[in-house]
Amino acid sequence: MQNNSTHKIYSGKMSNETFINLFMVVVLAVLFIGASLVVPNFFSMKIVVNLITNYWFVILIGIGVTFLLTTGHFDMSVGGIIAMTGVLSVYFCQSSTGSMPLSTGLGLPYGVAIVLALLCAVGIGAVNAFFIAKLKVASIIITLGTMSLARGIAQIVTLGAQRNTSLPEIYGVIGNASIPGTVVKVSVLIMAAFVILAAFVEKKTVFGRRTYLIGANPQAAKLSGVKVSKHVAILYLISALLAGVTGLLLASEYKAGLSNRATGYEFDALVITLLGGTSILGGFGSVVGTVIGALILCVVTSAATGLLLSPDMQFIIKGIVTFLAILAQRMALEKRKG
Amino acid sequence: MMTEPIRKKYQPTDWKAFTKNVYIYILLLFIVFIFSVIKLDQVEMFGRGNFLSPDSIVNLLRSAIPIITLGGGFTLIMISGHIDLSVGSEMGLSAVVYAWLAIHGVPFIISFAVTAVLGIVMGFINGLFVVRLRITPVIATLVNLNLFKGIALLIVPNGVSAIKSSDTIKMPEWINDYGRKNFLLGLPVAFYVAILVIVILFIVQRRTIIGKYSAAIGGNRIAAELSGVDAKKMVWLLYIIMGTLAAVAGIARASYMSLGDPLSGDGMETDCIIAVLLGGTAFTGGSGSVVKTIIGALIIVCMTTGLMTVIPPYYQILAKSLVLIMAVTINRLLDSSRVKA
């Protein structure tokens, strides 16, 4: 009997994932060229570099969101975690001898403060993990709750405003440092490192492949011996940790802990993940796609700003772009099958 | 010899079922009791400082109008296993459109009717995404959340935060009649409309096909479809109902505040989720109760208004999130129908 192990359900040699990634790159190119033609001053190296460097924080939390969406779960708490971690790190670092409540902190050494703040971020992730992985609560509901929880903690610590005084000198270093010789910030480098690490994990490690399996077929995963609950729990901890790192970098950059920072970032992260081709249905998606999605979103919003459209249009734009992307990807994949 | 019926000892499930049905009323009484006992003389809105004074009850119920209007429809959607995260933006857009119509001289009836039709359209769009285009409800309604919010923000002219009276144009005098002016017992017309909505939805959920089919779809969609339920039409209808209710809630809010604030519905979806969860509706669908959701809604309103006087404003988000987590935990613990996966 003929060996049919190489039988594919689609034509061509590349995987569906690569196909979608290429598809979105084409979309990106088309949008970029279109924007260059329509928007004045759009086409310049400065813009291109700015595209990536201004969006690094959304990509960084997008990594966690991508992994989780691949398993069919949402994480809406990342924005709140960013704010909370930033605020807490400032609070821990602020000198403990101060005249006003908002200038006084715990006076901990910098390293201790950073680690402690990250632990708090992971703590929020643990709450997520407990309710979603253990109690099997719907992820959208509980992460909306932890989003408010984290932001609520941030608001309490800053009394509704922000903390930005009495910080040690070292605090502002990592957020504002640049790679020597360029204007690219270290934060972007950190983001790129995490992206490369994530891409490696998702393609080449057992952990990564299991993530896809859980998303594609949870029952099969469980029957194959994958500890699904534990795996999803770990993903939530990782996502929270990434959000915590982002929060630290942002707080360091602005040398302030704002209680309303990162409002709406969770939705941006979801948008770029969806633009990148990650589907909630079937264990499909990639971090590389998310990066492409971020670039697409950036091109579109920059073009909108360049065309002097009102900032309120951003909501409509993000909605429409997400909608079109989901439909386009679905149509492209269905055409491929035929 | 006749066999005697086997006498059952009290099964654990008896207590569980009983608690499940009753706890929410106990919770409401508890909350009301707590806040009555705490001294509330700092805030004028509580009349003589008593939570249970007529003035404060009127204020409480008046601020509960939107969530009471929304809660029933949201319950039906969740019973069917779906979700609508765009209700807040639907409400905001409705408030803006209604205010815009009113301030430009359109009479009340027509403004109301046009906004209600807008609600139907918004619900139709939600249904289109979820049912026809088969996009996951979470993502579909999140997309529409942004879409509606964006449209509402665009309608409001640059430089102002809402559609309201200014030097050049004024809100008509009748603007408060619906949502704020005393109609009966100190409560406005909007309140009684909300009560009417609940009564209708209670009947719908318990005794009509809409309610039964929704539960069937939520419990086991494939079985329902094989039994002849047109799941697509039903879910689409539920989203349209939700949109219309959101429009009515938006009208009530705009009428109360005398302005159309595009952000006036923000956070409503979270409140609805908490109310539904407190009311015991399983979020995977299949069972639920409109009445219990409304009790849950009242609990939230009592807590929010009560807490507003006791804790500073920047504690509020944390308090709400803890309520949500508590509601989720209670819901989980009491959900005896869950199959242990």
Image (tube, coloured by chain):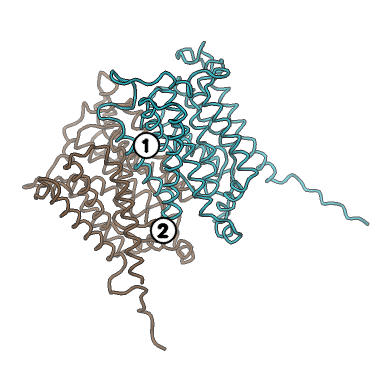
Calculate the distance from the C-alpha at mark 2 to the C-alpha at mark 1.
28 Å
Task: Categorize mark 1 by other alpha carbons within 10 Å: few (<14), some (14-19), many (20+).
Answer: many
Mark linked to residue B92:
none
Amino acid at the residue labelled 1: Ala
Please, which residue is most extreme toward the top here?
B48
* Label 2 secondary element: loop
Q: Is residue B80 left or right of residue A1?
A: right
Please, which residue is most extreme toward the left here?
A181
Q: Nearer the viewer, residue B62 or A191?
A: B62
Q: Mark 2 against mark 1, which lies toward the viewer?
A: 2
Q: Earlier in the sequence, mark 2 or mark 1?
A: 1
Please, which residue is most extreme toward the right here?
B1
Is residue A197 positioned above or below A252 on the image?
Answer: below
Asked whether residue B334 is in view, the answer is yes
Name the spot of residue B77 as percent of width and height, x first. 52, 45
Q: Is residue B136 left or right of residue A106?
A: right
* Label 1 secondary element: helix
The chain coloured brown in the image:
A
Amino acid at the residue labelled 2: Leu
Mark linked to residue A281:
2
Q: Colour of chain B?
A: cyan
Name the spot of residue A274 as percent of width and height, x first. 32, 53
Q: Mark 1 — residue?
A: A150
Q: Nearer the viewer, residue A9 or B228?
A: B228
Task: Categorize mark 2 by other alpha carbons within 10 Å: few (<14), some (14-19), many (20+).
Answer: some
Name the spot of residue A194 as percent of width and height, x first. 24, 53
Q: Residue at x 45, y 13 (%)?
A: B42
Name the spot of residue A170 as percent of width and height, x first. 17, 35
Q: Nearer the viewer, residue A232 or B212?
A: B212
Is residue A95 positioned above or below A243 on the image?
Answer: above
